[in-house]
Structure formats: C-alpha cells, structure tokens
Amino acid sequence: MEQKRDSEKAILVGCQTPLTDDLRSQYSMDELASLTETAQGEVLMSVMQKRERIHPSTYIGKGKVEELKALVDELEVDLIIFNDELSPSQIRNLSKDLEVRIIDRTQLILDIFARRARSKEGKLQVELAQLQYLLPRLMGQGTALSRLGAGIGTRGPGETKLESDRRHIRRRIDDIKGQLAVIVQHRDRYRERRKKNKAFQIALVGYTNAGKSTLFNRLTEADSYEENQLFATLDPMTRKVILPSGFSVLMTDTVGFIQDLPTTLVAAFRSTLEEVSEADLLLHVVDMSNQDYFSHEKTVNKLLEDLEVNQIPQITVYNKKDIAHPDFVPVADTETAFISAFSDEDRDNLKRKIEESIISQMEAFHVLVPSGEGKLLSQLKNETILRELTFDEEQQGYRCRGYALKDHQVSGQLNKYSVR
C-alpha cells in the first residue's frame, strides 16, 4: 500500500542543446513541472543549462553539478528530476556527487502510470515497463536503492523487488509477459466478437490532458476518470454512443500521448493502443487552450504513424474553444470540429459530423421489406442509418432508404429486397 507522505520538494534540471530552440525547451520544462505536480511533488525551482551536447557522465557540466550541490543544501530538497532519460552511469555519478535521490523524466512518467493503473492489465504493464527500465540500472545502485522509501519514482514494484537480483527480475518479466499474453488473447476474442457483430468502432486519441475523458463521459454517459492532470486515464474503456439517427457505435477512451514517451512504455502499452488499430474512425482531440497545441498535435500524429494507424479516417476535434489560446490557428488536414466538451450543442454537432463520416464509409440502400420481416426491420433500425421508413399500402411492405456498413451481415438480406 502506498504510504501517505507530504509532497516531496524537487529541483528540475534540463539541458538545452542547439537542436532545441528556447521556446521548445521552455515548454518541455513546463511539462516536466506539470508531471511533477501530477506525481504530487512540489517544484522549488528549475535549472536549465545550454550546452553543445549532453555531458556523457553527468548530463550537465561539472560547474552546474556544483551549483546544484549548493542548492540541495540550501533548499533541503528531497530529489532532483532530470528532463531526459539518464544512462545508468549518469545516475550513478550524479547520485554520488549530489547525495540526494536522482530520477529522470522516464521514471517520473512510470511513477504516474503506477499511480493511475486500475485494471490488472494496466498494473502488469506498468510493472513490466518499470522492471525493464530498472534492469540495466541495477549495477552499483545497491546503496542508493536501500534508501528508497515510497517517494516519487519508487512506486510500483516496491523496494524488495528493486533490490532483488537480475535473475529474479528477469523471471518476473517473463512471468508478467505470460500473464499479459493471456489477457491479450481474451481481448482479441472480445474484439473478434465485436467484429463479427460488425459494431462500428471509434477511438479517442490525443495528447495527455487534452480533454478526451471529459468528452468521452459526456458522449457516452460513462464514468471514466477525468481530472485536470496528465495521464488521468490509463486503462482503455469502451462504451456505446447513440448518434442522432439512432445508430449505435462503440467508443474507446485511450491513454494520453506525450512527447518523449519512454520507449519501455510505448512497448508495454502497445497492446492497449491496439484498440486504436481496430478503430474505424479516430477522434483526435486537441486542446486549443494550450499554447503548445501545434507540437502536441504533431506528436500524436507521429505516434499514430509509428503504430501504422494513420490511414484510418480521422476527425480532429479542437476542444476547449471557450478558452482557446489567442494565437490558435487550426493546422489539421483532416475533417475538423471546434467544440467545448461541456456544450450540449457542440457535442450534438460533433455527433452529426461523426455520422457524416460513417456514412461516407457505408453503402446506400433502397429496399422494400415485406411486413412479415419484423426481425430484418428491427436490424435496419438498430444496425444501419435509416433515412426513410414508410409503409407502402399497395406493395404491403416497408420502403426503407439508408446506409449500411459494406460487409455487415444485413447487406446480404437487403439484396433480396432491393428496389431497382
């Protein structure tokens, strides 16, 4: 169980090389501060050094390390958080020089994921990512690890696992992979069933804290965790959404994306993000109020490309229009919608846009269904988008016009009653 403790005092450290401009570096440090607050840390100050390249043994220069040493004593900090993934030797050298707990951006993100995981799968994936991160960093960390309590960057596997030997950790990694494989098989079967029933699937994607869960909850009347924090959602949740025509779709809320997402996490959460690859439509939610919206949008599109799902039809949903950033200019080359997730009118307009996008993936039908075919009529009402349903006295049947998914099981029956 996680121990209750006061928020830990932290100094944030970044290193800016010529590859990154001042604005980009500042955004990255601001994001690190938000991540620290999400992990319940208190940021006392940020330190940034400009260098030609990152120092191979201490990340920042020797002079900056001395400066940090003085700050640690003066401010009585609990930990220093570095804005990049540190190598095992960098962590070792910095811990020796600074005599305070050192964690990097990757550990911080893993820590937040450890706090957020609710389902068995989520917890296993976080533990797997933490152990994979830890394995190459075990050498020479004995003394540092024995001091660990329940602070930021130490949640998850726990102290005893951290200090156990590599063989034990490797065994645990194999064990977790085995358990995850079983869970993935279950999900595949569930997905196959959904495919067989030909449910239209929509996935919500976007940068962390863009407002996906808020929108998801209001479109589906679900209870996905929503909070103004990074990575509020970790475990995917799927719910039914009924569109204006009465057509039902399945919508999945996914984990938020972030710049420089640790590679161990991308690998660990690939199965979670597989929900995205099965989608028929993506809603890419972008926070219009964030001054860094452009690079957030770019980051998500790049990750979608890496997951090889960028060919799936997409609507870019610019959210928080009521508090949009003054410099906001839309850049998406997809269908777009401008909304506030809290506005009923905006959500209704978005549902109509979703319906139009679905219709573009369907085939039109015009059929005369005999009045005795009650089951087929019921299917048409629930599983297609009906635009006309009238009773034809003369023909003693129902004249139906609408749109159906191309390979839906109802299509075969419709051919029988098609009006030429």
Image (tube, helix red, strand yellow):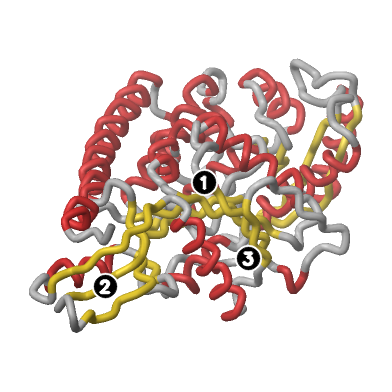
The local secondary structure at tag 2 comes to strand
Tell me the residue at 76%/63% (across/down). Answer: 289
Q: Residue 228's mark?
A: 3
Q: Which residue in the protein does label 1 denote? A: 313
As displayed, is residue 64 above or below residue 363?
Answer: above
Question: Separation of disc 2 and disc 3 at Cα?
Answer: 50 Å
- Image quadrant assignment for residue 141: top right
Q: What residue type is labelled 1?
A: Pro
Q: What residue type is labelled 3?
A: Asn
Q: Which residue in the protein does label 2 denote? A: 399
Question: Separation of disc 1 and disc 2 at Cα?
Answer: 31 Å
Q: In this view, does 154 lie to the left or right of 413?
A: right
Question: Which circle, 2 or 3, is nearer the viewer?
Answer: 2
Question: Which circle, 3 or 1, is nearer the viewer?
Answer: 1
- Disc on the earlier residue, 2 or 3: 3
The local secondary structure at tag 3 comes to loop
Q: In the picture, which quadrant includes the C terminus?
A: bottom left
Q: In this view, does 174 lie to the left or right of 11?
A: left
